[in-house]
C-alpha cells in the first residue's frame, strides 16, 4: 500500500500545486487492488464498427463482462514507470495546450493523468461525439517529462492513462472535477476547494477480509454542446467481485451537481456492498480531542454524517476519531438523503491558512426512486495523522447480493459549501465534550459532559413562557445534571448533560437528543456514540483544595 505521506505529495502535484492538502488520501486504494488471472477473453471494450455507443450498450457490456473471469491489468507498465520515485513522478505534467476540447467552443476542458508510481493500472479513455466512440490514444507529446529521467519517446503508444480532470470556463487553471485511482473521484463547489472523495462502489468495507476496490477501467467523455454547462461521462467498472456501468451528468456551480446512474452486476456473492460511498477525514474536532496535540484547534474534512430518513426524520451524527475502529449501521427504508458534511465553516475554529479546512465541500446524496430497505453505514477508523482518510459512509441494501443480479441505482450528488436540502427545524451547530461534574465540587465518580447547541428553525421565535425541553435517551448509563437553556450568541438553545457509565468497560453507549415544545419536535435529532475509557483510565482531575 502507498504510504499516506507519499500519496498526499503525489496528488498535490497532480492538482497543479494548489493548497488542497490530503486530496490523495483516497488514492490509498491504488495499492490494495487485487489481481486475478483470466482464463477467458473479455468482451470488447468498444462498440462494434458502425454500432453507436449508448448507456444501454455499456450496461450490456458490463453484464457480459460479469459472466467472464476477472482479468487484472494492474502493473502492466514499462519498468521505467514502475521504478519512478516521488521526485521523478511529480516532474511529469500534462501540457495544457493538449487539453481535450481546448480548440472547440466548449465550456469544459479535459487534462489527462500519466501512469506511474502508484498509478499502475492502465485506463482507457475515449471521446464521444454524435454517438460515436473515438479512442484517445496515448502520446508522449501530451506530457512534459521535466527531469523525471523518463524518455517519453520510448514508451508504448498504447500505454493508456491513469485518469483525468476537468476545468470549467470560469477558471481554466483550477479543476472542478477529477477521476483518479480505482473508482475514486472528487469535485468542488464555488470555493474551488477539494476535500472529501466519492467512489463508484465499496466492497466489503470494515470486514475481517481485505476490502476490495473496484476500478473504472474505461471512460467515455461526451463532447459538450457549444455553450452547455453540463458534461456527461460514462465509465466501465471492473473488479474480482463485480462489474458495472456508470453515467455521470455533471454541472459545475454552487453546488456542483452530479446525476449518477449505476448498473451493478455481481460476479459472486458480496457480504457488504456500499452504494454511493464517500471517504473523508476526521482527526480532531470540538467533540473529540483524542489526538489534540497539534497547534490547530480542529483538523477535519467533514464534521458529521447527516441523514434524512424515509419517515422524514433528520439526524445529525457528529464524527469522531475513535481509539479503535467503529462501525455503525442506521437502518432505514427508502432514505430521502444522506451525506458527509463540513458544517463548521469558521476559519477561527481551524486556524489553518494553508489548507483551509473551513472551505472543504460537503457531499449530499439524494436517492432517485425507491431504494428499499437497508442502512446508512458509517465506518470510523483511528488515525494519528491528517493524511489518512479514516471516515467512510455508504448505503448498504438489505437484500443479499448474489451473482447474476442487475442492481440499478440512480442518485444526485451535491458538492459545495452547504447541502441543498436541510431540515426546516433547528440544527445542531456545535457538539462539545469534557469531564462531567459540578464546578468547585470534588468528583467522587467519573462522568462525561455533553454539550449540544441547536440553532435555526423556530427557536428564535419562542416566547419566554414556552416550555421547551430536551428529550435525552441513552442505550445505557445514568443521565444527570441535564439542562436546556437559551443561548443568545446563536439565537438558539444549549443542551447539557452528564452521562455516568454503567460499568468499568469501554463498551459503546449510544445517545439521542432533540428539542421539544408542547409535544412537538423543534429540532433535528443529535445522535452520538461514546466509548468510555476503561475504569482504570478514568481520571477525576480533582484539584487539591477541593474536599
Image (tube, rainbow, N blue to C red):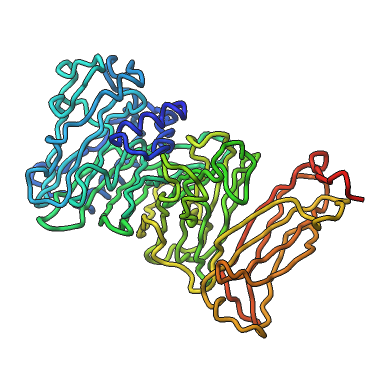
Residue 95: where, in percent of width, then height?
16, 31
Could you say which quadrant of the image residue 61 lies in? top left
Quick check: 432 left or right of 141?
right
Q: Nearer the viewer, residue 146 or 369?
A: 146
Question: In the rendered image of this protein, does residue 92 appear above or below residue 417?
Answer: above
Residue at the image point whose x is 57% and y is 34% from the top = 384
Q: Residue at x 22, y 42 (%)?
A: 173
Q: Residue at x 26, y 23 (%)?
A: 91
Q: Residue furthest front?
A: 545
Tell me where residue 218 appears, x and y as whole percent: 25, 39
Q: Position of residue 245 (x, y in %)?
A: 30, 48
Residue 340 seen anywhere in this rendered image of the structure: no
* In-front residue for pair 334/535: 535
Q: Is residue 303 left or right of residue 60?
A: right
Residue nearest the viewer, comparing 382 with 67:
382
Residue 66 figure quarter: top left
Q: Is residue 247 left or right of residue 349?
A: left
Amino acid at each position: 500500500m502507498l504510504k499516506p505521506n507519499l500519496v498526499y505529495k503525489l496528488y498535490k502535484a497532480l492538482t497543479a500545486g494548489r493548497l488542497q492538502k490530503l486530496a490523495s488520501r483516497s488514492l490509498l486504494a491504488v495499492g490494495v487492488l487485487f489481481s486475478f488471472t483470466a482464463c477467458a477473453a473479455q468482451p470488447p471494450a468498444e462498440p462494434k464498427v458502425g454500432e453507436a455507443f449508448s448507456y444501454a450498450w455499456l450496461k450490456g457490456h458490463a453484464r457480459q463482462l460479469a459472466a467472464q473471469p476477472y482479468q487484472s491489468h494492474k502493473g502492466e507498465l514499462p519498468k521505467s514507470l514502475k521504478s519512478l520515485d516521488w521526485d521523478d513522478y511529480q516532474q511529469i505534467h500534462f501540457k495544457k495546450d493538449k487539453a481535450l476540447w481546448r480548440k472547440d467552443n466548449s465550456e469544459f476542458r479535459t487534462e489527462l493523468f500519466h501512469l506511474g508510481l502508484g498509478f499502475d493500472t492502465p485506463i482507457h479513455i475515449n471521446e464521444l461525439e454524435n454517438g460515436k466512440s473515438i479512442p484517445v490514444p496515448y502520446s508522449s507529446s501530451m506530457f512534459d517529462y521535466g527531469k523525471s529521467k523518463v524518455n517519453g519517446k520510448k514508451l508504448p503508444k498504447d500505454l493508456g492513462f491513469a485518469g483525468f480532470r476537468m476545468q470549467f470556463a470560469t477558471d481554466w487553471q483550477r479543476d472542478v472535477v477529477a477521476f483518479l485511482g480505482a473508482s475514486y473521484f472528487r469535485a468542488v463547489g464555488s470555493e474551488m476547494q477539494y476535500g472529501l472523495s466519492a467512489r463508484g462502489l465499496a466492497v466489503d468495507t470494515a470486514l475481517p477480509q481485505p476490502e476490495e476496490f473496484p476500478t473504472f477501467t474505461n471512460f467515455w467523455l461526451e463532447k459538450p454542446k457549444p455553450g452547455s454547462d453540463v458534461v456527461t461521462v460514462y465509465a466501465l467498472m471492473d473488479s474480482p467481485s463485480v462489474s458495472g456501468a456508470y453515467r455521470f451528468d455533471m454541472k459545475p456551480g454552487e453546488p456542483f451537481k452530479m446525476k449518477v446512474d449505476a448498473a451493478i452486476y455481481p460476479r459472486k456473492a458480496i457480504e457488504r456492498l456500499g452504494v454511493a460511498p464517500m471517504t473523508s477525514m476526521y482527526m480532531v474536532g470540538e467533540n473529540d480531542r483524542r489526538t489534540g496535540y497539534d497547534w490547530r484547534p480542529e483538523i477535519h474534512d467533514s464534521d458529521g454524517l447527516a441523514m434524512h430518513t424515509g419517515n422524514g426524520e433528520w439526524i445529525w451524527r457528529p464524527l469522531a476519531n475513535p481509539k479503535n475502529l467503529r462501525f455503525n449501521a442506521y437502518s432505514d427504508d427508502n432514505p430521502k438523503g444522506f451525506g458527509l458534511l463540513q458544517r463548521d465553516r469558521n476559519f477561527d475554529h481551524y486556524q489553518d491558512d494553508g489548507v483551509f479546512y473551513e472551505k472543504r465541500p460537503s457531499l449530499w446524496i439524494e436517492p432517485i426512486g425507491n431504494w428499499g430497505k437497508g442502512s446508512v453505514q458509517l465506518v470510523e477508523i483511528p488515525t494519528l495523522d491528517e493524511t489518512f482518510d479514516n471516515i467512510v459512509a455508504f448505503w448498504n441494501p438489505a437484500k443479499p447480493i448474489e451473482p447474476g443480479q442487475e442492481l440499478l441505482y440512480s442518485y444526485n450528488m451535491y458538492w459545495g459549501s452547504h447541502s441543498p436540502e436541510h431540515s426546516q427545524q433547528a440544527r445542531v451547530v456545535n457538539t462539545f465534550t469534557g469531564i462531567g461534574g459540578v464546578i468547585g465540587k470534588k468528583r467522587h465518580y467519573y462522568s462525561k459532559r455533553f454539550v449540544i447547541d441547536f440553532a435555526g428553525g423556530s427557536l428564535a421565535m419562542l416566547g419566554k413562557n414556552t416550555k421547551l425541553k430536551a428529550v435525552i435517551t441513552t442505550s445505557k448509563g445514568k443521565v444527570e445534571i441535564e439542562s436546556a437553556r437559551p443561548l443568545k450568541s446563536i439565537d438558539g438553545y444549549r443542551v447539557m448533560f452528564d452521562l455516568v457509565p454503567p460499568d468499568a468497560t469501554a463498551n459503546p453507549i449510544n445517545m439521542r437528543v432533540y428539542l421539544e415544545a408542547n409535544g412537538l419536535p423543534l429540532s433535528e435529532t443529535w445522535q452520538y456514540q461514546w466509548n468510555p475509557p476503561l475504569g482504570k483510565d478514568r481520571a477525576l482531575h480533582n484539584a487539591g483544595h477541593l474536599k
